[in-house]
Amino acid sequence: MYQFRDPIHGFIDISDDELKIIDSAPFQRLRNIRQLATTYLVYHGAEHSRFGHSIGVMHLTSRVFDSVTRKVPNLFSDDEEENAHKTAWYRQLLRLIGLTHDLGHAPFSHVSEELFEPGKEHEDFTKLVICGTEISGYIREIGAKFKKQHGDRYDITPELVWMIYEGKDILNEEFIVPDFFFLKNFMDGELDCDKMDYLLRDSLYCGITYGTYDLDRFISTLTAYKQNNQLQLAIERGGVQALEEFILARYFMFIQVYFHKTRRYLDKVLVKSLKAVLPGGKYPDDVSEYLRWNDARILDLIARSEDSDVVPFKNRGIMTCVFESKTHADQADKQNTKLIFNQLKRKYGGRVLYDSVDKAAHRLAPALLAPQDDSGRGIMILDEGTGDVKNIMEESIILESIVKPISINRIYADKNIAAEVRKEIQKIRSE
């Protein structure tokens, strides 16, 4: 057993077998994949990587799983021995899912995904890395030990790890319903461990408090409920305030960090640079070749390039944001911003730029969907006294105000004409 000292979670226990995965080349590559892409050029502390985040998520999956399974006896089987085997099996599967879930990210994370071949996403590469590199062998070693300790039915394979994480191959005879849907909630739901880690980690490294929340209280109030062959994560009624804090933290992080006006512009300029320096303007399809690309290699190519599309990023040639819509722009707001931009474009050409971003920070389902929604996307509140299950929207007045998706529309202009363009915008809006 090893321990990693983490700035968010303190000491994290790592088994010898898990350490083999961490020490592998595909995982070590994550040290050179920034978690927040170009945000380090805005918040200079944001140099953290997918490496630490992945270890943090692995830690949280087992911490949350342990908390929930302690509260709900025989969660997976009425037979105590079978439940014990399944609990140990699922716990290890979750840790492996958490550890490997980001292995397929491209340099600068989500920003450069448009440089994949059409139809590909970073998850496609994650699957290839889990199932087709040395990591596959290390996962099978863990599976072999589990079979020996718990029985043949408790094997762990890279294909099984991916099947649970992806959650789509439900007709596969190995897909256990509802248990595997429940496990997926830990990594891809409104209460998932991925969000729990990156909010705190991003806040720390950005030097801000927007994404902080009471992790200990939040975890302590998470539970599970069974209903009509459904098994879902839920939160106890006493944890509603901790949940509100968690949801608001993510909402604020999107507005203040992830969709920061300068970060959004730098992302666009970086993509243009990548198209100029990557062979053929795309990432390779072959997983071995793909894994050779990381932030450091990209930045080296950019530093040595004199291509006109690279110069703005290299020399920090940042346009000024001269117009920004409200945070929750409606269709009329979007149309008005686009009309203003079109007029500016006719006059200023390439010296102005339009950007639009839309995102539902949390999928807060309408209360009417409540217990009937078995997708795992809704957030359910469990009354421990009565056993009643309600949708969070029936309990929280605060969250009603952020159901609307974030929609921000911006216009940028070259610095030397920014003042002039602002006046032109005022003129257009007054007409």
Image (tube, rainbow, N blue to C red):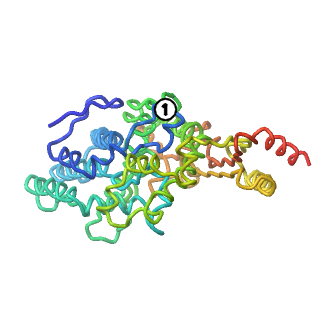
Measured from the top left, where is residue 366 in percent x and y?
59, 51
Find disc 1 in the rendering and name its residue: 44
- Pick the residue in front: 429 or 221: 429
Could you tell whether 251 is left or right of 294 in the image? right
Spot occupied by residue 120 in the image (x, y as percentages of width and height): 43, 66
**Can you say which quadrant of the picture contains the N terminus?**
top left
Tag 1: residue type?
Answer: His
Q: Residue at x 58, y 38 (%)?
A: 396
Q: Is residue 118 left or right of residue 344?
A: left
Q: Residue at x 22, y 55 (%)?
A: 135
- Residue at horizontal 32%, vertical 61%? 289
In this rendering, position of residue 26 left or right of residue 341? left
For the residue pair 30 and 377, the one nearer the viewer reads as 30
What residue is shown at x 52% (from left), y 44% (from top)? 314
Q: Position of residue 292 (x, y in %)?
A: 32, 55
Q: Quadrant of residue 2?
A: top left
